[in-house]
Image (cartoon, rainbow, N blue to C red):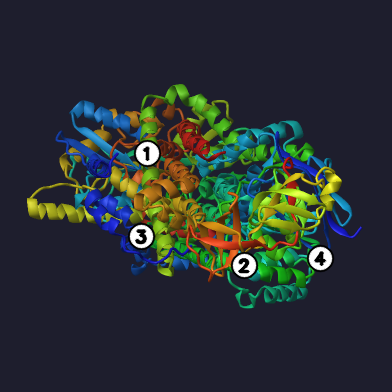
Amino acid sequence: MSRSCFNRYLTAMLCCLTVFGTSLSHAEQVVVYSARIEQLIKPMFDAFTKETGIGVKFVTDKEGPLLARLKAEGKNTPADMLITVDAGNLWEAAREGLLKPIESKTLEANIPAYLRDPQNQWFGLSVRARTIIYNTQKVKPADLSTYEALADPKWKGRLCLRTSKKVYNQSLVAMMIAELGEEKTEQIVKGWVANLATDPLSDETKAMEFVAAGKCDITIANTYYYGRLMAKNPTLPLAIFWPNQAGSGVHVNISGGGVTHYAHNVPGAIKLLEFLSSEKAQNLFADVNMEYPANPKVKIDPAVAAWGSFKQNPINVTKAGELQAEAVKLMDRAGYR
Amino acid sequence: MNALLELRNIRHAYGRQVVVSGLSLTLRKGEIGCLLGSSGCGKTTVLRCIAGFEPIRTGEILLNGVTVSNDNICLPPEQRHIGMVFQDYALFPHLTVAANIGFGLHRMQKKERASRVAELLQTVGLADASSRYPHELSGGQQQRVALARALAPRPDLLLMDEPFSNLDVSLRERLSLEIRDILKSQNATAILVTHDQDEAFAIADEIGVMQHGEIQQWDTAYNLYHKPANRFVANFIGQGVFLPGKVLDSHHVEIELGVLKGDISHKCTTDCHLCREGYPVDVLIRPDDIVHDDASPVQAAVVHKAFRGADILYTLRLPGGSTALSLVPSHHNHAIGEKIGIRLAADHVVAFSQSEP
Amino acid sequence: MRVKGETLDPMARDTTTKYGFYGYLASTYRTSSGWRFLPFLVAGLVLIPIGTVISSFFAPAGDIWQHLVETTLAGLLINTFWLVLGVASGTALLGVSLAWFTAVCEFPGRKFFSWALLLPLAIPAYVTAFVALGLFDYIGPVQTALRTWLGPDLAWFPNVRSRMGVIIVMILAFYPYVYLLTRNAFLTQGKRSLEAAQSLGFNRTQGFFKLALPMARPWIVGGVMLALMETLADFGTVSVFNYDTFTTAIYKAWFGMFSLTAASQLASLLIVIVFVMMVVEQQFRARMRYAENRQSARVDRIPLAGWRAWLLAGFASGTLFFAFLLPVAQLGIWAASVFTRDFDQRYLEFLWHSLLLSALAALLTCSVALLVAYAARRYPDRATHTAIRIATLGYALPGAVLAVGIFIPVAWLDNWLSSIALQLFNMETGLLIQGTLFTMLIAYMTRFLAVSHSPIDSAMQRITGSIDEAAMGLGLNGWTMLRRVHLPILKGGIFTAATLVFVDVMKEMPITLMTRPFGWDTLAVRIFEMTSEGAWDQAALPAVALVLAGLFPIILFVRQTEK
């Protein structure tokens, strides 16, 4: 290949690559930045497109990078909507001015107040309860009561926990701070750490398996992890215990979304949110991931309902975000890795 | 037996190809030997066999009377207490000159090592280059470092593989003499391998002319030049021509230019016919055997001349038609085609019977 | 080697007009200062994301620093220190010994092991980590089996979720860097130096320690630096082990305490540490040269027999087993269990995307590394070397941090371009550069330049100035010299670089996640999705595909260089 020919080829290739990503499509669509992974969100988007004809383009990533991306893109962002798997990051997104408050009677009707932003910048779409999982062969339900009680010395060497670096534990501790205050929460967390049978684990499915194998007797996990594990391995001696029923209720977190501040297609995004809060989509949430619907009018999936009903803690989940940084620092001080 | 190195009938081959066959030599302590030959004659292979990098098929190599190589054993190089200077010097590029030289002195104490290195640096004239790196030195300097490095552990035998082939001619001459002085001052025993006669003559005490893996003659430079054992050596060493001649007796041979007086009786023992009167022989006539003499009746025509600074090498056509060479002081500048007077000035005879190789 | 001073080459002027821009770049080899600025240009490019990260120091990070100092910082630094020390010594020992044995000795299976020992490169370190834990932790098959045989009390069984566990997993994952580079060194060292050592009284073993090893130092250090940068930047492996390092603190500050500023400040510290390490290493090598004066013959292999040979074969097998075979087997089992459910034709799409990205990134990054190495050779001064050091820093930053560091300037540029478009043409263009392959490739180049620079730069050391001069004397210049003289000598280094970049890009996650076009997923993205939900067995399917895809360049490369 002669020199000049090679030059032209190279330049052409570069141009193609540049153009490659620019998409100038004209059909209506909503663009979503999602921290919820594809297989847990695509079915809902497909259902939406089928019903309304509006296409959904989405990209998945961790929340931190998604938020940084939204911020950097500013008003040229292609994103119309942001979806996360916890309340803390929604709170942060709102705080950074990345979300836009919207008016929607449907959403206000479908989603209870404690599961959405007081300023209507984001709405919970599914609920995950964080509950106590115990070994049925070693522990009787009568032995358990609250999250706080797990700090009791009688549980020494019998507790397994997931790492404090995971947002679900951060949210839990944040809610505890909201309810009980920092000092008390720190003592409780210190108590948990003292009771650990082994170093905190990197994921809660592992923690539950440890419980089943007998290394420890109890752990705290999200309900859907429990559901998945039991579906894979029904013979495991594990069961759910709903803590704090006499008190404020089980700690819950949400997977939810909001419209971005500089969204190009605000009506489309609102439509999508409303769809996701409707019965059809809410059932899909349960189908794909065994979560609880945020919409209280929707019937709970039988497999999930089989775990029993429980009282949810009605503190607005926005507190989870507000106090997350505090919670992280508290856990560091308490030595909870 | 005070021979330091003895090679007895060694033979080496690469697969089927024989590289060295039936080679023997002896080297005494303090002597500098040389293997001289053109490329491919096997001289480097012999050196590597002595060093222990190559095994031998048959024969024996003895160092200080101890067998180090034969058809069964091959003592590893590191145990032979020899030193080697490679053709490309093989200096360690990541070490300074001083570190290179001191590399083989790992068994010495630090102080001792430092003083030995300093001593050698002084000897090779590189005292101010001790902390430089090889790539910062010139070719001649690198070569001296290589020599110093090899000499540092006071090896029993020093081997040098074409040590000057990478240097330019003027440097070669000067370094040859310097190296000889260094070696003699250290009372080193050494074997050098080269294709360059001048180098061999300048450095070595005894030289072995090699061809096809065999030593044709192992002798001093003077003897190789003036008393070559066979035609190959006669042709290889120096220059000269063969002129036809007739034996008169064991001390006289007649050629076209006159009668040569010299002792050829040693040849009669090998070939008793040679000393008979009238026996035809080829006589070696070197350029220094024919001198220019204006008074001489014998005239020869200049066919070719090569100016060499101090002298001119004339190729002459003798009256009888044969060609001869003559070395003449260069202020006798004659043109091609001119006839000049010449006469014989040899006081020895080198003659081969016409059937001798 | 210092190349002789400038000579005006009339050919260069002509070739500018004849061959266009790229021809100019190549033909100015001997003349103008085009080459002078190249390293600075590349360094400048890399400095943009790094600068973005460091600029975080201009913003306040609240009390996060104070909090860290009061609570976990000391522990983090100690953890990080031991991790670095452990991985550096482990990879050096393992990599160098394996390299020596496969380069210089002959033992059963040597030919196979020569390239097979590279295979662990294809597996991301965190995959090895979760397989190791999956197998050896309390609930894994090993301990479960032992408990059934020996009873419930296994206090003697080592705790895998420990510092030692992380170090061992990382050694197994990163030793190929050291192995590869060091092996190149030994193979090209030539036998003269070793013979010289023998003639000075050193036997072969001593020759190794006193000569071969020191002479291979730039390669060894290069490999260990790569392993260390991977270690420092790693987040996946230490997450799986829940081992707190400096990098986990970076992510905690970012994701947990919602402070990208604090995270960036911490990351800047990391950059400074790595930079200092590089400078120290550079000082060390300042005046030394590692080129042989002449091209030397290759070393004859030392044949080993008896128990020694089998011991070596066992050593190599053991390494290969734990670093590659075991993880792949476990992945295979997991993948098989989900295959029918999860595998669809989208996998071919993911595979294609991964391969395309990796190949293009390897091409771009190696070309840049080659050009930069040339420029350094031409102008081997302090400034150039510093610029190159900076240019390779991208590798030491944790992936997501670098991704953000790249993204912010790209987005800024995009916004600026679109505002200009709006002003000049009244056209709403949206984002132009972001979300294109071009941006992705530049981002990869920023991250992986270190990986391609190391082997190419080391290979370049073998080309002496006299080779250049000989070539020039024969009338070769510019492109032709590059093509006919240098490339054959550099071939090994270039292939090493290309393979490393290829495999690294295949495994890369954070930059891919952040810069990819919509709906454009790769195998690594797939793995991310699965592992973020703790579905390790589902993650095994794309992981196996990734490993298999990564095997091809490794085997290809070895075909090219193994003699």
Between B217 and C257, the one lying in front of the other is B217
> How far apart are the two marked residues, 1 and 3, measured between alpha carbons?
68 Å
Q: Nearer the viewer, mark 3 or mark 4?
A: 4
**C2 on left or right of C11:** right
**A14 on left or right of C111:** left
| Residue position marked by numbered label 2 in the rendering | B173
| Residue position marked by numbered label 1 in the rendering | A127
Question: Considering the image in quadrants, where does the C terminus of chain B appear?
Answer: top right
What secondary structure is found at the residue carrying circle 2?
A: helix
| Residue position marked by numbered label 4 in the rendering | B30
Q: Would you say the residues marked 1 and 2 are in contact, meaning their CB atoms lie under 8 Å apart?
A: no
| Residue position marked by numbered label 3 in the rendering | C30
Chain ID at mark 4: B
Residue C473 spot, x, y in % from top left: 42, 56
Query: Residue flagged by tag 2: what amino acid is it?
Result: Glu
Q: Are marks 2 and 4 on the same chain?
A: yes
The earlier-in-sequence mark between 2 and 4 is 4
Give the residue drawn at x 30%, y 51%: A69
Give the residue drawn at x 27%, y 44%: A3
Q: Would you say the residues marked 2 and 4 are in contact, meaning their CB atoms lie under 8 Å apart?
A: no
Give the residue drawn at x 58%, y 71%: B132
Given the current orientation, which residue lies at the most extreme top position? C340
Q: Nearer the viewer, mark 1 or mark 3?
A: 3
* Vertical comparison of C123 with B128: above or below: above
Residue A132 spot, x, y in % from top left: 51, 41
